[in-house]
Amino acid sequence: MISKEMEKAINEQIRAELYSSYLYLSMAAHFEADNLRGFAHWMRCQAEEERGHAMKFFDYLVDRGGRVELMAIDAPRTSWSSPEEIFQEVLEHERKVTSLINGLYEKALAEKDYPSQIMLQWFISEQVEEEASAEEILHKLRVLSGSPQGMLILDRELAQR
Ligand code: FEO
């Protein structure tokens, strides 16, 4: 049986993952409005992935005999000044999520909660990928620095995700 403290922390993480999903969906809506369909597709996939993360925590809590309690999700921002600003925000957001996951892992270590440690190792590796992919796209956007031709090529590339 999972501890009450860990149950609460995982419920908060479910909210954080659902907020991530909501934020990326809002970014998808922004790209759709700008006719950058490839960027929008990438963000839609990202939003789905975040929902998957929330469900991983949801299912884990159920398996450990915990009680899932969904909380209110804040409204995300709805507009940005450039794709570069968006991916800068994605990177900062993912770094924040990484620190939340690390915090959960530290709690699992302190509680000697071995199953939670194993479950969280997946998320620790996932965060390395999440930060790397945001960084890669941000780097490309900086190299392109607004070149319309380059943006179309990148849009096509992101549509392949
Ligand atoms: Fe669920 Fe992008 O971390």
Image (cartoon, rainbow, N blue to C red):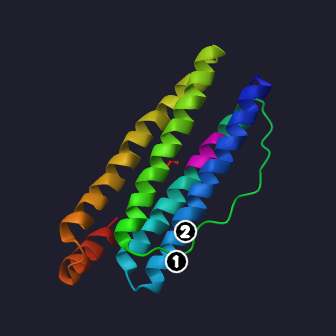
Rendered residue at 37%/71% (across/down): 83
Residue 161 x/y as whole percent: 35, 64
Rendered residue at 56%/47% (across/down): 53
Residue 12 x/y as whole percent: 70, 42
Question: Label 1 belongs to which residue?
Answer: 29
Q: Residues within 10 Å of mark 1 (few under 14, many from 20)?
A: many
In this view, 154 is above or below 3: below
Q: Residues within 10 Å of mark 2 (few under 14, many from 20)?
A: many
- In the rendered structure, the answer to whether residue 55 lies left or right of residue 158 reads right
- In the rendered structure, the answer to whether residue 142 lies left or right of residue 59 reads left
Q: Magenta includes 111?
A: no
Residue 33 x/y as whole percent: 47, 85
Rendered residue at 30%/60% (across/down): 138
- In the rendered structure, the answer to whether residue 21 lies left or right of residue 60 reads left
Q: Are the residues tagged 2 and 1 within 8 Å (C-beta)?
A: yes
Which quadrant of the view contains residue 38?
bottom left
Quadrant position of the N terminus in the picture: top right
Q: Which residues are magenta?
A: 53-57
Residue 47, numbered label: none
Q: Amino acid at mark 1?
A: Ala
Question: Label 2 belongs to which residue?
Answer: 25
Rendered residue at 62%/23% (across/down): 107
